[in-house]
Image: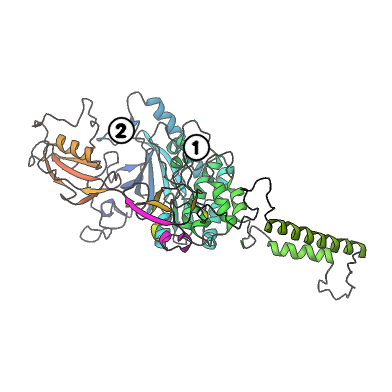
Amino acid sequence: MLTEERYLCMGCMSMLDENGNCRCGYDEDAPTDEACLTVRTIVGGRYIVGRMVKMNGEAITYIGFDKENEEKVFVHEYMPQKIAKRNELTGEVMPLAGCEAQYKTHMADFFDLFDALRNFRHTENMMPVINVFSDNGTVYAIYKFIKTVSYGDYLGHNGGEFTWTQVKKLFMPLFTTLTYLHSNGFVHRGISPESIRVNAKGQLMLWNFGTAALYSKGSVVEPSLSAGYSAPEQYSAGSWQGEWTDVYSVAAVLYKSLTGTLPLEAESRKEVDHLCPPEELNKSIPSSVSDAIMNGMYMNSEYRTRSIDDLTAELLESSGSNTKLFTVTDEEEIKKAEEDYFDLDNGDDKKEEKKKIRLPWGFIATMIAMVILLGIVAFLFRFTEILGFGNRNDPDKPSSDSSISEPVEDNGYLIAVPNFIGRMQTDVESNEQYSDFVLIFEEENNNNYAAGMIFDQSVKYRTEVEEESEIVLKVSKGPEKIPMPNCVGMTLEEATLLLTEMGISFQAVPNFSAEYEYQIIYEQSAEAETEVTVGDRLNKIYIYYGAQEGGESTSGYDPWDEEGYVNPGVTIIGRG
């Protein structure tokens, strides 16, 4: 091996400098999740495992290095933590007692999925799988390393939304790849701005592949569902999934791309569906595109657009689509039809006499008489309305002219309330078309909506109200933040109960040095009184406590059960 392992950074697999440091700043001694392999572990006899890149209920992905080909890779390890654990000494993955059959069955599905992906062609818009093998009692899939960013970050760095022209250029190649996957019997199920990557060429690439169990609620593994992007059928264990499941997710990503607004979660749409058509949030979106997206996001899968090809056809229905999928535009088709019908001069040298269209005089006279008759009828109808004879049978029946609002008793007008949910407060305040309402904004914490986004309205969508009616709009302040308590000096039991009651996600890190008192918290990652987010599992708080072997807890609380597992309410990761 030309590159010596000891000179590689386990954070990015680049060469360390002369002082043994790397510009990525990775600290090899930093605490890691107990479910992960130890860095520098070698799997398959050739792949060096580095830091954990991402983790879900089915697998863990690491940055890796292929010793044979001298190149970076991604190592994707089957590790379903709900039904398996890791032997800390050997690194082997073992099924939990009673879960052996589930573990093996699901592992076989995992192997089959990635083995099939490894043999796929037309993978320019997929992160390529280059190897699949068994080791450590589990399965590993090796992805080719391609430098990418998530589509969510890419979208955010470009102002949060794109035009339809930009979106079309980005997504059409990805649609081709999805159609190829579907034609081979595979459904992704996990499409979201995080599972779509953008490479240096600006191309979209799919990854985050997983088995059906990973993207279905009620399965043997912890499901990985994306709020706003996962289809309704993925929240029900008995619902049928298929191509239409990916259609929903793709349409939701397009919704976010064109409006900058996170689509409502499918679960919340079951009771009352407040999903606002994209063209109402962004007037520049063509109606055909807006309709196609809404058709792709139908809650009932039977009425939803059934395939990516059908979705593509609906998206490109507009004559101004300018896509290579159509050989001629609608205007060209019309022009060609006109030329065929009237036999117009096509530029040939032959000067053929154009055919003249002759209409019989009798036909013309009949048409003129009909026009005059219709005019007289319209005049008489309007005359009777003016004299008060219109709508005789029902004097309260509104006029058939839908452009005129019917007056109410106080001489005001009834106006239909628009859907404010999912829109930003600043956009609503600056929109003059809402000046007919008295809007009252009330801020509340909400974990499901971004700060500044409206998540509830006091008057339901499409309700008819009078002008100057008050409508209370609830605006998200983002997730709730609370001051971090001072846990230093507390017992592990006391700190665990306190943080759990406060809703703060945390991990307890043992230190087996004799320097620290047994079961007593001596350090915490967030200082006391610092604001922390309630329920944020992605940014956990670390509390460090003494765990000298052989010591006795002053509180009598032991985080480990008789079989060596962590008791509920506390997560232990090694340190010291």
Q: On the image, numbered disc 1 is attached to which residue?
A: 233
Percent of width and height locating residue 387: 69, 57
Could you tell whether 167 is left or right of 483 in the image?
Answer: right
Residue ID at (85%, 64%): 368
Between tags 2 and 1, which lies in front?
Answer: 1
Q: Are marks 2 and 1 in contact (CB under 8 Å)?
A: no
Which x, y percent locates residue 193?
44, 52
331 or 61: nearer the viewer: 331
Residue 119 visible in the shown view: no
Left/right of residue 214 with respect to residue 165 in the rendered view: left
N-terminal label among 2 and 1: 2
Question: What residue type is disc 2 on?
Answer: Lys
Eyeballing the image, is 97 above or below 499? above
For residue 94, above or below residue 391: above
The residue lying furthest to the front in this view is 387
Q: Which residue is mark 2?
A: 85
Q: Residue 489, image x and y in percent?
A: 9, 41
Is residue 438 one of those drawn in magenta?
A: yes
Task: Name the element at disc 1.
Answer: helix
Part of the protein shown in magenta:
427-452
- Residue 46 painted magenta: no
Pick the quarter of the image with the C terminus: top left
